[in-house]
DNA sequence: GAGCTTTGTTCGGACATCGGCGGAAGTCGG
DNA sequence: CCGACTTCCGCCGATGTCCGAACAAAGCTC
């Protein structure tokens, strides 16, 4: 059931999105009477979800009292679980970062160890921000593998031994927990922070692996089994010799992933092991590395060219480890996409580097948590007993 | 603004979908009081949208009065405009076919001529079905090219000379007109008729060209510029020699489209010009034709394998002219998709031939029209003065 | 400071919804 | 065949929600 127009949740959504900052705005936008709006806003204030700030500027009459989210007393967490690191961000209801931390941590140590670590970091960050544990309303988590979003259970993740089907939410009994693929939360964070008006966006992460988060109609597309966006094993032409860990050959990841580029560099006599090594070499001005990164961009671009025709996004954001040298990667991507995609699809297409940087995933996961908590359905439940 | 739960439109949606056939069902499903439901249903009956039928079976008490859409007095049209044909289907509100016709017609004759023809056929079909012209509530149309759905204007369609930016809806002043790409309406029709529970579905049309309709979250995905699903110009590996009319080479359409298969057959000494010729040859048992169709299936499958990883659909439906010999085409497609896509994405994936047949597009276009008319927003407008 | 404008609150009335009651219309068991 | 039971449906008073007019508040303009 969809919420009624102008319901408390709807009102809060407008305030949260910044579409409305006064009661008058709300009345205009919802079409409800001013008296009704006042009543709704009062309820939201009473529940601690909204607060009044100083009076705004008069436009010739009585100045309005500005409304905004009441960000005290609540906290939300975003967790970015990588293969070898764990980043936790504590945010308020408006999405502002309150505190954060990052530690090296092997996801392969298994769920109990890793989630206990997360739990400890949450306590520390909450203390830092001066908020009690019960203030934590919801937690979002991005993990490096496929997840069944509805239940928060990893689904045969290749690089998360011991996590298969583990019910992550049950580890945090006192607050709502939303678990998603790391690339999905990065896509969400980028779209919400940098491209709020864009309805169709792809976020491509080029690191050791290659993945893609899909925002369609402003919402994450996860597909039937939650495995949408797994573009690392799409075939690219002319590289039949490259075998991939998935058992096939000529997979995008096997020829353009960070590890693949490093291996090819090593073959050329420039020792490199990981994507980070490649980035360092490019930054040091190594021309072989630069050439190979650009070539990797072309290969990613070949796959993206097809996806642009298929999905017709407005924006493609390129992130991940290799994007630290994004000029060269992007150059290769753009070159191929604009050559191989149809004009109608590329005419208004932007291909840009990620703006959110290293904590993109943690912030995106936090946004997942906040949007869950502020969803009209949830707010209506909070307001009506 | 989303409609309120249990609004007249919501009630009608449940009846239309077959989820509820009695007042009691509606009360259970909406959570509203039985008295409220009765009132809503009365309003819908008064407006001629719903009718009572005979009593249903008792389950131990008073038998319920069954409700269904009141299909008399309304009519909806679906128009399938092809490059060389025009098919018009007249349907009632439940999606049942009332009358239909097909004529050879060159879309290249331009909008005035073609739309005048459609108009004439509409009158004839309405007369056949015994309904007056004003009974026509909405019209859906599928055209062979990209369309800006919101305005119903073709967007630089390659095979529709004279139609660029032509405002098709203005030609039919008295009823709502929805114009979409032909593959999109085929996808919609197939999903609604044959796979109502499936949320993510791809419809692949293999004919002279190759296109794809995308259903995501149960709704058509049209993309940013309405060009989503144009998979005919995605690159396939190992066919650099094949030039395409789009200016690139190795496009899927240039190696696996009906015209391409026909050309390759001709080169092998078996004369063929169009996809229809190829179908005839296969049906006649020509082994060369059979082999090439299967090979075309493999090529389509290579592209679909990537799209399966990216989009993660539950069902892929294969339609279009070449699918009349779908055993061979499907065999090639399945072979490649199941080899090249990730297990998580293929595990619950079905690849099936289209069930709706030659009038798939016309029926899908009609469904577009009906769903527009029965959308909760529109129904609420109809019921409340 | 009077009048104007805009914002926000108060309050009575209109309207929709709820839920109990009773009648209608069937089944079931004796 | 008939009464008990079940389910469906309409009626109606009670309840609560929402609206809109009137009013108060707080600024601007002259």
Image (cartoon, coloured by chain):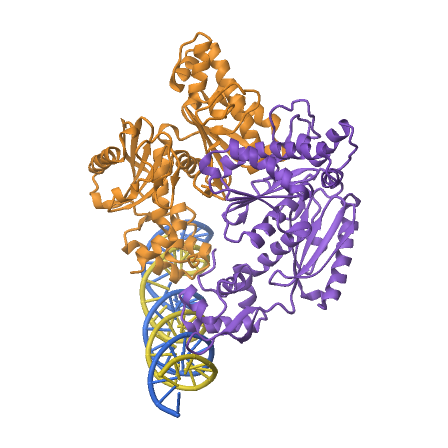
Chain colours: A purple, B orange, C blue, D yellow
What residue appears at the point 71 percent right and 30 percent down from the top-left corner? A245
Q: Left or right: A290 with respect to B18?
A: right
Foreground of the two, B220 or A200? A200
Residue B4, percent across and down?
A: 43, 59
Quadrant housing the C terminus of chain A: bottom right
Whether residue A102 is visible here, answered yes or no, is yes
Residue A138, percent across and down?
A: 65, 59
Work out which residue is located at the far top of the displayed protein and give it. Answer: B269
Q: Left or right: B282 with respect to A333?
A: left
Q: Left or right: B51 with respect to B262?
A: left
Q: Is B114 rendered above or below residue B41?
A: above
Q: How many labels does the image show?
A: 0
The quarter of the picture where residue A293 lies is top right
Whether residue B348 is visible here, answered yes or no, is no
Residue A54, percent across and down?
A: 55, 76
Foreground of the two, B183 or B345? B183
Q: Is B63 rendered above or below residue B203?
A: below
What residue appears at the point 64 percent right and 66 percent down from the top-left corner? A74
Foreground of the two, B31 or B7? B7
Q: Is B179 rendered above or below residue B64?
A: above
Residue A379, percent across and down?
A: 55, 63
């Amino acid at each position: 059931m969809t919420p009624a127009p102008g319901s408390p949740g709807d009102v809060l959504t407008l305030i949260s999105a910044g579409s409305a900052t006064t009661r008058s705005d709300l009345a205009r936008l919802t079409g409800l009477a001013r008296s009704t709006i006042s009543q709704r806003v009062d309820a939201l204030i009473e529940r601690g979800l909204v607060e009044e700030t100083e009076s705004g500027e008069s436009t010739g009459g009585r100045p309005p009292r500005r409304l905004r989210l009441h960000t005290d007393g609540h906290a939300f967490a975003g967790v970015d679980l990588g293969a070898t690191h764990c980043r936790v961000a504590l945010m308020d209801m408006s999405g502002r970062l309150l505190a954060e931390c990052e530690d090296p941590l092997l996801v392969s140590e298994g769920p109990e160890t890793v989630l206990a670590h997360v739990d400890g970091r949450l306590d520390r960050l909450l203390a830092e921000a001066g908020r009690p544990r019960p203030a934590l309303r919801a937690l979002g988590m991005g993990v490096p593998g496929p997840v069944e979003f509805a239940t928060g259970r990893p689904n045969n993740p290749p690089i998360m031994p011991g996590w298969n089907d583990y019910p992550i939410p049950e580890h945090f009994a006192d607050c709502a927990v939303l678990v998603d693929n790391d690339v999905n939360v990065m896509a969400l964070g980028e779209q919400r922070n940098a491209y709020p008006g864009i309805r169709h966006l792809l976020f491509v992460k080029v690191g050791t692996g290659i993945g893609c988060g899909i925002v369609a109609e402003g919402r994450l597309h996860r597909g039937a089994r939650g495995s949408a966006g797994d573009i690392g094993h799409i075939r690219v032409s002319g590289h039949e010799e490259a075998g991939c860990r998935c058992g096939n050959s000529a997979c995008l990841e096997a020829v353009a992933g960070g590890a693949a580029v490093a291996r090819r560099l090593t073959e050329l006599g420039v020792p490199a092991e990981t994507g980070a090594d490649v980035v360092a070499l490019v930054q040091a001005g190594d021309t072989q590395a630069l050439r190979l990164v650009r070539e990797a961009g072309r290969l990613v671009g070949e796959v993206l060219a097809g996806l642009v025709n298929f999905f017709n996004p407005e924006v493609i954001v390129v992130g991940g480890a290799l994007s630290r040298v994004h000029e060269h990667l992007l150059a290769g991507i753009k070159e191929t996409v604009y050559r191989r995609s149809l004009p109608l699809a590329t005419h208004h297409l932007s291909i840009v580097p990620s703006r959110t940087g290293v904590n993109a995933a943690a912030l995106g996961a936090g946004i997942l948590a906040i949007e869950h908590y502020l969803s009209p359905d949830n707010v209506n439940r909070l307001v009506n007993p």
